């Protein structure tokens, strides 16, 4: 379990937020004007089949902005929601919309790896900092972008952890691996295969983004292979249907999947009985582990408990807001602030290393399990 650190008012002790006063009066960036009326944007799916995780994150960002504005009532920051529907095809146009709004100083997101691949070059060219709370494909930090940062571990941490759990905890020696051909799904599946080696007795590819609903081909192959576990690299909408169809075909081997499936919407899609026992990994802690009053504050504002990546999105937003508070009122200034940022959030402690990656010492990967129709924490997976 995460070691509990000192509780603080508002749930987070961001180092850069300690200084008093508002950014309006700091005058730190004479060329940038004041921060009053500045904007940050959330970039991710808010509608469509991929919306559940995006809504989790957007609600976390809303809480951060709400708290900031209450503390800085005479110098507020506006939140701009950018609904990508999780589609890489929509990402470039949406990124350009953000770039064209000179008041937007930073982005929380994009939420998914595919849309980050599509939007990243545009943000980099414009010098618009983007801090993702959930895009985990390792290649994103290898593009030479100066504006990309993430507050979670990548699939080089999550994939091996998932493979380790399958091997050491489940002790499954016959595993079938399926991915949705997305940047995220393929990357995660490949890392799992590396760990499991010869225990992978078959693999298949399906279509994501709601483009496929009949998975009988993959189901038939998995059943014929007499597997002990099925790993799926992709998102919850397809994962739920695959699990449902596996169960209908008499395949009782448990499914293991990554953070893209770690949402209650997966259970709805699969059906409670079929989803029972599914293992879901995440390079994040359980929301119940979030420090301070985050959980209570989130529910009070949004009317629901925090979900996967609600806390990391909250922290990502607070990093941007800390920069604005410190008088970083230009995109260039805020980018430099984030690059050198060190601080404590509700989900983790933050320091960025090469490529905008979170310091590996701060990365934790947890396994969650579907029990009684709910996703509950199972265990933190030890680093290999």
Image (spheres, helix red, strand yellow):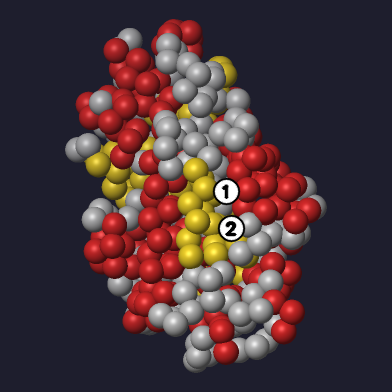
Residue appearing at x 49%, y 91% in the figure: 20
Q: Where in the figure is residue 132, as x and y percent of width and height?
A: 57, 54
Residue located beneath label 1 in the image: 110
Front in this rendered view, residue 360 or 99: 99
Residue appearing at x 43%, y 42% in the figure: 46
Residue located beneath label 2 in the image: 107
Q: Where in the figure is residue 6, as x and y percent of width and height?
A: 38, 82
**How many C-alpha atoms fall within 10 Å of the one at disc 2: few (<14), some, or many (≥20)?**
many
Badge 1 marks a residue whose secondary structure is: loop
Residue appearing at x 44%, y 60% in the figure: 61
Relative vertical location of residue 31 with respect to residue 291 in this rendering, above or below: below
Residues at badges 1 and 2 in contact (C-beta under 8 Å)?
Answer: yes
Left or right: 243 as drawn, with respect to 140: left
Q: Residue furthest left?
A: 372
**Distance between mark 1 and mark 2 Cα atoms:** 8 Å
Relative vertical location of residue 334 with respect to residue 246 in this rendering, above or below: below
């Amino acid at each position: 379990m995460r070691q509990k650190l000192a509780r603080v008012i508002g749930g987070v002790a961001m180092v850069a937020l300690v200084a008093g006063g508002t950014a309006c009066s700091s005058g730190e960036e004479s060329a940038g004007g004041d921060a009053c009326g500045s904007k940050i944007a959330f970039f991710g799916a808010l509608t469509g089949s991929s919306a559940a995780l995006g809504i989790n994150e957007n609600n976390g960002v809303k809480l951060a902005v709400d708290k900031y504005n209450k503390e800085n009532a005479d110098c507020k920051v506006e939140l701009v929601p950018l609904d990508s529907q999780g589609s890489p095809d929509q990402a470039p146009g949406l990124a350009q919309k953000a770039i064209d709004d000179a008041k937007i100083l930073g982005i929380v997101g994009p939420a998914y790896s595919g849309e980050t691949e599509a939007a990243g070059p545009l943000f980099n060219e414009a010098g618009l900092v983007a801090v993702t709370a959930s895009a985990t494909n390792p290649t994103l930090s290898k593009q030479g972008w100066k504006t990309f940062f993430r507050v979670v571990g990548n699939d080089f941490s999550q994939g091996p952890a998932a493979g380790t759990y399958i091997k050491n905890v489940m002790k499954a020696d016959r595993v079938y691996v399926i991915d949705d051909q997305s940047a995220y799904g393929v990357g995660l599946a490949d890392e799992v295969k590396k760990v499991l080696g010869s225990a992978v007795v078959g693999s298949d590819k399906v279509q994501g983004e709601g483009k496929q609903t009949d998975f009988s081909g993959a189901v038939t192959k998995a059943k014929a292979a007499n597997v002990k576990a099925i790993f799926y690299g992709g998102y919850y909408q397809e994962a739920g249907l695959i699990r449902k169809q596996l169960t209908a075909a008499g395949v009782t081997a448990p499914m293991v999947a990554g953070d893209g499936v770690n949402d209650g919407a997966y259970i709805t899609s699969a059906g409670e009985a079929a989803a029972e026992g599914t293992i879901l990994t995440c390079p994040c802690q359980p929301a119940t582990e979030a420090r301070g009053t985050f959980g209570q504050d989130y529910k009070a504002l949004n009317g629901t408990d925090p979900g996967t990546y609600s806390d990391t999105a909250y922290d990502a937003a607070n990093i941007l807001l800390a920069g604005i508070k410190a008088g970083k009122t230009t995109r260039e200034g805020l980018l430099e602030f984030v690059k050198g940022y060190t601080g404590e959030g509700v989900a983790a402690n933050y320091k960025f290393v090469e490529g905008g990656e979170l310091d590996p010492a701060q990365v934790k990967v947890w396994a969650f399990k579907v029990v009684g129709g709910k996703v509950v924490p199972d265990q933190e997976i030890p680093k290999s």
